[in-house]
Image: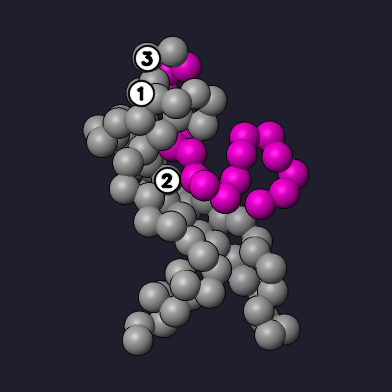
Amino acid sequence: MRATTLLNRVLDLPKTMVGACPHCDFRTRHRYDTPMVDSAWRHLDLSGRVCVLKLRRRRLRCPEHGVLAESVPFARPGSGFT
């Protein structure tokens, strides 16, 4: 089993295939662009090791909210928690 598969199962990370607006229910397969900067979230530590989730989020154009980074299932806008 690959290490990424194992971590996806342990951390219960679903596959995100469709970009979604973080403020409404708008979903699209088209992207506006993909910035070359990674977003990072600290997860619960695993066996005394620091676990940081890094993701290169695409930007999408929502008809209501304009261009913004797609949502991820484990983080909400403005939340202090992941």
Q: Residue at x 44, y 79 (%)?
A: 6
Amino acid at dot 2: Arg
Measuring from the top left, give residue 80's x and y in whole percent.
Answer: 74, 44
Q: Residue at x 72, y 49 (%)?
A: 81
Amino acid at dot 1: Arg
Mark 2 and mark 3 lie on one chain; the one further toward the N terminus is 2
Secondary structure of the residue carrying tag 1 is: strand
Indicate yes or no whether the magenta region holds residue 53. no
Amino acid at dot 3: Pro
Image position of 38 with respect to 2: above or below: above
Q: What stretch of residues is rendered in magenta?
A: 65-82
Measuring from the top left, give residue 48's x and y in whole percent.
Answer: 72, 84
- Residue hosting label 1: 61
- Residue at mark 2 to residue at mark 3: CA–CA distance: 19 Å
- Residue hosting label 2: 57
Q: Nearer the viewer, residue 14 or 52?
A: 14
Whether the residues at callouts 1 and 3 have beta carbons within 8 Å, the answer is yes
Q: Residue at x 51, y 31 (%)?
A: 22
* Residue found farthest to the left: 30
- Quarter of the image for residue 42 reads bottom right
Secondary structure of the residue carrying tag 3 is: loop
Measuring from the top left, give residue 57's x and y in whole percent.
Answer: 42, 45
- Residue hosting label 3: 63
Looking at the image, residue 13 sits to the left or right of residue 52; the answer is left
Image position of 32 with respect to 5: above or below: above
Q: Residue at x 35, y 86 (%)?
A: 1
Q: Nearer the viewer, residue 38 or 48?
A: 48
| Residue 59 in view, yes or no | no
